[in-house]
Image: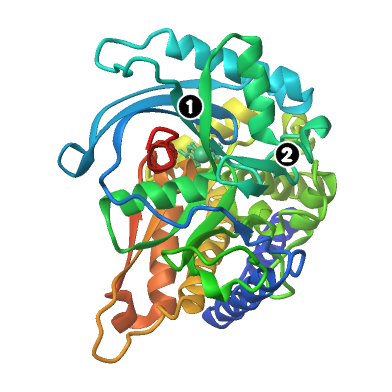
């Protein structure tokens, strides 16, 4: 019928608008490299903030002792303690607890959020067992992983530039986030030194390097997306401090805020951005990351329901609720291999309360998942390729075999198989066979927490 033809037309236009042929990916990668240079040249020189992390030494393996870490990312935060045993022992023991953040705290006041965090941390400290023994008279030390853009003023202080990923707490912006945490810890009577403040990408880079000396960059694909890498200090014109002894500085790119005329954006992306808490910001993040992929899918389905009666004569009311399709649901549908796509059917039923769907409808839904996820995955690959180009590691150097390892973390990369497979194959496609052999992508599970603890250890007040 005419209606079905309209469904197919909407699908076809989406596919066209999301297309990422290799030439386009190369343009995106080149634009990324250009913006990296601009962001390093001057403050505010680019959409890419290219933030200086104050981490000029990555873990060596010698780190010793007992440290805490706190990881505040998207919807969950984790508290952990680790016992580090140097080159031989490595991470001798590790304990962690995950706490979910009540949604109302993401958009209320700064004190409320930090009180909640400090309380959870205090509760966790109270469960410290015999194995974690602190020498007499020593204060506990913490590495604080904070996955939002921060202008660092030292390794252990920095002001929040803006919230992302659905957080919006006005009174924290421009404030020192370590100061906010310390005050909250004082309020709950917790005595702990915040030794390092790190972005999750920087933590993941540190955690990755701890186990693998060839790690040169880290990428997060979770609720949001971001990357960090090791830059040569003299290649950072905006750095006016002393050149670090190592000659290196870790840069937190904040690549989620990248945008370029080369990005394939659709009508759905423009509207999603317009309706978001941070319009005009985090454009790359909004087409790549876990917070948004399911929402893009919902918007396409809503158009199909509205204009082509995809779900019958009326639009399922649930389909009008923003963010009702979560990315884990999308990946469950995308990976449905049953002949009648029964997972797709049951998800549509559970989430949208659509009692029955035909096989051809389910097939359309899988195609939408594929188009939306693959665009995100291929653009992430282009970003990584851009970093490798910036580092001169995108092509084999004559005579030399320099290995480059990218440490990846985040729930999207970890759990969305089609996404991570598409990302890795696209990166190979960009690099070509020969260079692909010297580039490796590894999953650095929970690297950011351990990484923050390692950085606290290497910057301990007791060293
Ligand atoms: P954060 O980024 O908030 O620190 P994670 O790295 O754990 O936390 O990533 C969580 C995100 O990963 C979720 O918001 C979701 O978007 C995505 N995710 C988790 N599980 C899946 C899944 N099975 N399929 C697709 N995406 C997933
Ligand atoms: Mg995280």
Quick check: 142 left or right of 20?
Answer: left
Query: Which residue is more in the foreground, 156 or 306?
Result: 156
Say how many tags the image has. 2
Beta carbon at label 1 within 8 Å of ligand 2: no
Report, in whole angstroms, how far the alpha carbon at label 2 lies from the one at label 1: 44 Å
Asked if ligand 1 lies within 8 A of label 2, the reply is no
* Residue at screen point 71% across, 66% down: 259
Q: Is residue 208 left or right of residue 109?
A: left
Which residue is located at x 76 percent, y 36 percent? 175
- Which residue, given by chain and number where applicable, does mark 2 sit on? 312
Residue pointed to by mark 1: 78
Where in the figure is residue 411, as x and y percent of width and height?
A: 47, 41
Residue 43 visible in the current orientation = yes
Q: Is residue 391 above or below residue 97?
A: below
Q: 260 left or right of 77? A: right
Q: Position of residue 307 (x, y in %)?
A: 81, 50
Q: In front of the other: label 2 or label 1?
A: 1
Residue 301 locus on image (x, y percent): 69, 46
């Amino acid at each position: 019928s005419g209606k079905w033809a309209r469904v197919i037309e909407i699908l076809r236009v989406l596919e066209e608008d999301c297309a990422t042929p290799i030439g386009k990916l190369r343009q995106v990668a080149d634009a990324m490299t250009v913006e990296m240079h601009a962001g390093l040249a001057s403050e505010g020189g680019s959409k890419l903030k290219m933030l200086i992390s104050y981490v000029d030494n990555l873990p060596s393996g010698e780190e010793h002792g007992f440290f805490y870490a706190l990881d505040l990312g998207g919807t969950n935060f984790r508290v952990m303690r680790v016992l580090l045993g140097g080159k031989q022992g490595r991470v001798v023991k590790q304990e962690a607890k995950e706490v979910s953040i009540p949604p109302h705290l993401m958009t209320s006041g700064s004190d409320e959020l930090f009180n909640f965090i400090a309380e959870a941390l205090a509760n966790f400290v109270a469960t410290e067992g015999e194995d974690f023994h602190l020498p007499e008279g020593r204060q506990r030390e913490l590495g604080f992983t904070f996955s939002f853009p921060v202008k660092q003023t030292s390794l252990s202080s920095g002001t929040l530039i803006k919230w992302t990923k659905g957080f919006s707490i006005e009174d924290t912006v421009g404030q020192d986030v370590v100061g906010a945490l310390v005050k909250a810890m004082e309020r709950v009577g917790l005595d702990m030194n915040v030794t390092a403040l790190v972005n999750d990408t920087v933590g993941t880079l540190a955690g990755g390097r701890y186990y693998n000396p060839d790690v040169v960059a880290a990428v997060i694909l979770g609720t949001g997306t971001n990357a960090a890498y090791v830059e040569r200090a003299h290649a950072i014109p905006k750095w006016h401090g002393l050149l670090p002894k190592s000659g290196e500085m870790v840069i937190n790119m904040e690549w989620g805020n990248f945008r370029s005329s080369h990005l394939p954006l659709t009508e759905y992306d423009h509207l999603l951005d317009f309706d978001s808490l941070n319009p005009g910001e985090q454009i790359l993040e909004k087409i790549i990351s876990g917070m948004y992929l399911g929402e893009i899918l919902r918007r396409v389905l809503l158009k199909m329901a509205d204009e082509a009666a995809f779900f019958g004569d009326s639009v399922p009311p649930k389909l009008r609720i923003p963010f009702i399709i979560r990315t884990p649901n999308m990946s469950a549908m995308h990976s449905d291999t049953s002949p009648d796509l029964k997972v797709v059917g049951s998800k549509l039923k559970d989430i949208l309360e659509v009692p029955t769907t035909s096989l051809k409808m389910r097939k359309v839904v899988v195609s939408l998942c594929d188009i939306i996820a693959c665009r995100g995955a291929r653009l992430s690959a282009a970003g990584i390729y851009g970093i490798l180009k910036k580092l001169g590691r995108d092509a084999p150097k004559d005579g030399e075999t320099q290995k480059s390892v990218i440490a990846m973390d985040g729930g999207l990369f970890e759990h969305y198989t089609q996404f991570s497979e598409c990302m890795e194959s696209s990166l190979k496609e960009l690099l070509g066979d020969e260079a692909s052999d010297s580039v490796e992508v590894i999953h650095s599970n929970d690297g950011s927490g351990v990484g923050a603890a390692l950085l606290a250890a290497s910057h301990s007040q007791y060293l």
